[in-house]
């Protein structure tokens, strides 16, 4: 069974928008790049990554860099390395584990910088008041 541990080594965040101006509606573009897959030692792969968030309009920019340590059986690790050498994407468990950590970290950073988070917030539908229905019969 594959196990993934994620470590963030570098965090860079900057708010470009003046603190006194209200932030307009924005779109956040996120980008997760796997830089490589290297064998750290027998039984473990090291997966360096870079995660970036860019806002349109340019309200802020966030960048996180780190490494992920993947452990598992020799066959699983060999398959991961081979698929990476064939220019195929890594297994979803690796991408999902990294994404979970960096998105949570970025939400905390967004709160600190007072900017919108990169994940869409749930929309609560407005409740429409119904008119009382007409009785089906009249006396």
Image (spheres, helix red, strand yellow):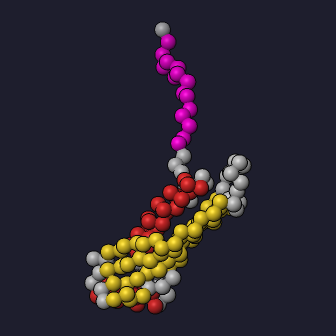
Q: At x 51% / y 82%, what residue is drawn? A: 35
* Above or below, 80 relative to 26: below
Residue 131, x across and y down, in percent: 55, 24
* Above or below, 28 relative to 36: above
Q: At x 29% / y 81%, what residue is drawn? A: 72
Q: Is residue 111 magenta?
A: no
Q: At x 56% / y 37%, what residue is drawn? A: 126
Q: Quadrant where the N terminus lies?
A: bottom left
* Closer to the camera in the image, 12 or 126: 12
Residue 82, x across and y down, in percent: 40, 90
Residue 19, x across and y down, in percent: 68, 51
* Closer to the camera in the image, 23 or 56: 23
* Above or below, 101 relative to 4: above
Left or right of residue 96, residue 17 in this image? right
Q: Is residue 128 magenta?
A: yes
Instruction: Give the extent of the magenta segment.
Output: 124-138
Residue 54, located in which quarter of the rendered image?
A: bottom right
Count of labels shown? 0
Q: At x 41% / y 76%, what residue is drawn? A: 68
Residue 58 seen anywhere in this rendered image of the structure: yes
Residue 103, x across and y down, in percent: 49, 63
Q: What type of secondary structure mainly makes up the magenta span? A: loop
* Above or below, 20 relative to 3: above
Residue 80, located in which quarter of the rendered image?
A: bottom left
Residue 92 seen anywhere in this rendered image of the structure: no
């Amino acid at each position: 069974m594959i196990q993934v541990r994620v470590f963030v080594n570098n965090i860079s965040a900057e708010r470009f928008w003046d603190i006194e101006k209200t932030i307009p509606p924005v779109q956040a573009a996120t980008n997760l790049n796997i830089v490589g897959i290297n064998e750290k030692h027998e039984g473990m792969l090291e997966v360096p990554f870079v995660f970036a968030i860019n806002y349109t309009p340019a309200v802020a920019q966030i960048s996180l860099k780190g490494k992920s340590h993947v452990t598992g059986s020799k066959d699983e690790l060999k398959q991961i390395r081979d698929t990476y050498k064939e220019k195929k994407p890594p297994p979803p468990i690796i991408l999902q584990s990294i994404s979970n950590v960096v998105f949570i970290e970025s939400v905390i950073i967004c709160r600190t910088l007072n900017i919108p988070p990169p994940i869409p917030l749930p929309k609560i539908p407005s409740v429409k008041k119904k008119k009382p229905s007409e009785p089906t019969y009249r006396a």
